[in-house]
Image (spheres, grey):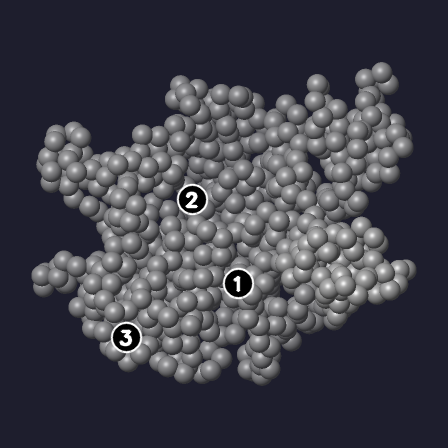
């Protein structure tokens, strides 16, 4: 018997199957094994078993060992690997690595066990302990009263010498007991009897009445989508099926997990990158062994190793975090669609602001559209006031807060309520510039401006993480006239502290959430009203439910509006709607102050009225005229390398071949090549070919073949479909 094995090395030359003899090992497809490869032993995965091989017998080596008691790659994941390999032009091993915890590879994480002590039933222990041995008697009684106790606890509460004596004499038995590392074990859970609204009940019934369908659940903020998700999951579990629930931000997972544990108990497992290595490994094992049947997590949880999946839910489906922007690149919704079809289950895409592409498919009938257009407690959506910041400047206000936002903040805090301030820019100021000569501090390895971080007194690159000393004088001309750019979360929090010196101001961004459980600690402190104001980036914009938040301030609504990206207006609408939805979610009315320098832009008109459908019609018409998605697919070929010459050569060669292909091909709407907007990242020169292709032409094999011709060890080349970020 022979096994076809893919070795765990990410390399184009090794992206193929190698034959090994099975010997007397008990193997099946999906098993993780070690195999001799050259002069070393390396891990690999059994792809299939065969009675025959085309290799000469003398070249066949035996598999060294099987590493796990069960196949770590399921049959479904094998099929998914083939789908992703063809769809996204990925290497086999890069896809397989998505399916298991990364630290499991190489044996960097293992099952955790502890020593457990109990009374040996085969020995009359009390008769063997002398009356004078008081310490031994105490240890014996401690174990007898508890039935079973960990050795560490026993030693901490009794004489360690006496415990050793009892174990050595066989009076106490010791065994290894596996310990599961459970994340967020201290979360409070409280099961609530929720009565569904008519809209919620209609949504549950409509979703439950269809099979193997993708449902777009369009529900305004506060309409109770989470309860609908849980009811649909309950129905799947009643049918002995499993479920996957995806959320866009790690910060949302504790809140969702608390609700889900209240409803489904230990059947829930959580998967995301913020867990410790051991926690992620144990949660993954609970899923693959069937101990847990509901997977909750961020993007990577779409690969949860569940069987018989009954429902998959992607909450905030429009969010950009569901697109993987590094190798291996993939779209979460397309992975979920594959799994839905594999099991014949339903896929729910939920959002208050669906992506244009998703709503377009719903309008065409490809998706079932279910709408929830009212908040569950009948509260109106918050009132949004637009402040023209140009008028503020004319009035002599050069601060980051408008007069109206300042007044609203004082009123809100004075009445004992809470406020959230949104600015989607971290750090203290976005750049540092010399007023005398115009010099701007830039990263040495990336073609981007450095961001000033006051707390660390450093200039930082947000692309590569490099740090530089703060500038006191201009290195170019020696001037001391240094100007700092646009405000970030750090500066906003500082200004608020000046306004409210007696209040706790919390800040939530990538800088304050580096440590494990940082998200949870910040949100818990705010939920318990230990702080009156929470400042944050888009981490605070979605999903959070704080009943005492009555004011939301959007400091710079224009920030996402003027990017050179066809989705910039859509993203602005989504962000405004989502962050505004944090206000007035309970009995107290909510208000939003939106600061902008472009108050007449049409996006604000639709955001203020909460009119998604009118916004969709406007945006969809523009895209149809300009031939952008959903009326085309964007394909981007990104070339990166240390040598500018090598990058330019590969780019030009590919472009010429694709141009020849496009001349006789009606699928191409647009084709061009250029340097990437961010031309240098981590000392890698970057260039790209952009094309827009009509969606009815599904195959990109000819383009992938051209890409393969130019791949070498001097440049990396990736092809992306509808990339989130074109910079």
Quick check: 16 left or right of 188?
right
The C terminus is located in which quarter? top left
Hey, which quadrant is residue 424 in on the image? bottom left
How many numbered markers are drawn?
3
In the rendered image, the vertical position of residue 216 relative to residue 86, given as above or below: below
- Between circles 2 and 3, the one closer to the viewer is 3
Q: Position of residue 458 (x, y in %)?
A: 28, 41
Which residue is label 2 attached to? 725
Please name the residue shown 85% across and 61% down the image: 128
Secondary element at tag 1: helix
Quick check: 577 left or right of 303?
left
In terms of depth relative to the viewer, which is nearer, 535 or 718?
A: 535
In the rendered image, the vertical position of residue 226 relative to residue 301, given as above or below: below
Which residue is label 1 attached to? 254
In terms of depth relative to the viewer, which is nearer, 370 or 249?
A: 249
Q: Residues within 10 Å of mark 2 (few under 14, many from 20)?
A: few
Please name the residue shown 85% across and 16% down the image: 58
Which residue is label 3 attached to? 413
If you read the primary sequence from the N terminus, does the residue marked by circle 3 or circle 1 appear first? 1
């Amino acid at each position: 018997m022979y096994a076809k094995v893919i070795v765990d090395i990410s390399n184009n030359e090794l992206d193929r199957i190698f034959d090994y003899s099975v010997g007397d090992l008990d193997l099946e497809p999906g098993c993780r094994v070690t195999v001799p490869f050259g002069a070393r032993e390396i891990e690999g995965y059994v792809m299939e078993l065969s009675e025959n091989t085309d290799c000469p017998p003398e070249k066949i080596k035996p598999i060294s060992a099987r590493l796990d008691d069960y196949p770590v790659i399921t049959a479904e994941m094998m099929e998914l690997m083939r789908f992703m390999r063809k769809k996204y032009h990925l290497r086999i091993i890069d896809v397989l690595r998505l399916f298991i915890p990364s630290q499991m590879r190489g044996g960097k994480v293992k099952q955790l066990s502890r020593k457990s002590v109990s009374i040996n039933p085969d020995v009359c222990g009390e008769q063997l302990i002398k009356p004078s041995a008081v310490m031994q008697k105490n240890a014996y009684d401690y174990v007898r009263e508890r039935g079973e106790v960990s050795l560490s606890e026993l030693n901490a509460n009794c004489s360690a010498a006496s415990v050793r004596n009892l174990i050595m004499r066989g009076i106490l038995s010791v065994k290894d007991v596996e310990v599961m590392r459970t994340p967020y074990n201290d979360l409070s859970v409280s099961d609530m009897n929720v009565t569904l609204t008519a809209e919620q009940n209609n949504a549950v019934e409509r979703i439950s009445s269809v099979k193997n369908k993708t449902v777009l659940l369009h529900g305004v903020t506060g309409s109770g989508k989470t309860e609908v998700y849980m009811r649909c999951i309950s129905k799947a579990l009643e049918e002995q099926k499993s479920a996957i629930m995806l959320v866009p931000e790690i910060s949302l997972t504790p809140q969702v997990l608390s609700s889900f544990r209240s409803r489904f108990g230990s059947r829930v497992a959580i998967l995301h990158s913020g867990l410790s290595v051991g926690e992620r490994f144990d949660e993954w094992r609970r899923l693959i062994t069937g101990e847990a049947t509901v997977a909750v997590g961020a993007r990577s949880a779409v690969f949860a190793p569940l069987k018989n999946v009954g429902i998959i839910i992607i909450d905030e489906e429009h969010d950009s975090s569901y697109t993987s922007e590094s190798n291996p690149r993939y779209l979460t919704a397309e992975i979920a669609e594959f799994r839905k079809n594999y099991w014949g289950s339903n896929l729910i895409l939920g959002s208050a602001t669906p992506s244009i592409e998703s709503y377009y498919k719903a309008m065409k009938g490809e998706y079932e559209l279910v709408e929830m257009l009212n908040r569950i407690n009948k509260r109106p959506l918050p009132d949004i006031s637009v402040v023209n910041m140009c008028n503020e400047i004319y009035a002599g206000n050069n601060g980051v807060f408008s007069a109206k936002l300042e007044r609203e903040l004082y009123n809100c805090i004075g009445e004992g309520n809470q406020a959230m301030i949104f600015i989607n820019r971290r750090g203290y100021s976005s750049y540092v510039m010399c007023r005398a000569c115009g010099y701007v501090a830039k990263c040495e390895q990336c073609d981007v401006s450095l961001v000033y971080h006051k707390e660390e007194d450093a200039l930082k690159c947000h692309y590569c993480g490099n740090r530089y000393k703060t500038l006191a004088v201009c290195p170019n001309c020696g001037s001391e006239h240094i100007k700092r750019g646009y405000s970030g979360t750090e500066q906003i929090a500082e200004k608020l502290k000046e306004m409210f010196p007696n209040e706790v101001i919390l800040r939530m961004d990538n800088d304050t959430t580096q440590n494990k459980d940082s998200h949870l600690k910040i949100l818990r402190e705010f939920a318990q009203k230990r702080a009156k104001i929470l400042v944050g980036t888009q981490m605070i914009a979605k999903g959070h439910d704080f009943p005492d938040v009555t004011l939301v301030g959007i400091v710079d609504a224009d920030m996402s509006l003027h990017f050179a990206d066809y989705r910039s207006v859509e993203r602005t609408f989504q962000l405004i709607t989502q962050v505004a939805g944090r206000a007035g979610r309970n009995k107290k009315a909510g208000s939003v102050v939106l600061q902008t320098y472009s108050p007449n832009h049409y996006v604000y008109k639709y955001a203020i009225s909460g009119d998604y459908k009118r916004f969709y019609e406007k945006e969809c018409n523009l895209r149809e005229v300009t031939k952008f998605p959903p009326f085309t697919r964007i394909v981007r070929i990104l070339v990166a390398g240390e040598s500018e010459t090598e990058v330019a050569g590969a780019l030009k060669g590919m472009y010429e071949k694709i141009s020849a292909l496009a001349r006789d091909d009606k699928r191409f709407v647009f084709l061009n090549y250029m340097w990437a907007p961010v031309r240098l990242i981590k000392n890698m020169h970057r260039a790209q070919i952009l094309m827009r292709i009509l969606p009815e032409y599904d195959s990109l094999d000819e383009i992938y073949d051209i890409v393969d011709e130019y791949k070498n060890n001097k440049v990396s080349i990736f092809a992306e479909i509808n990339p989130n970020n074109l910079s």
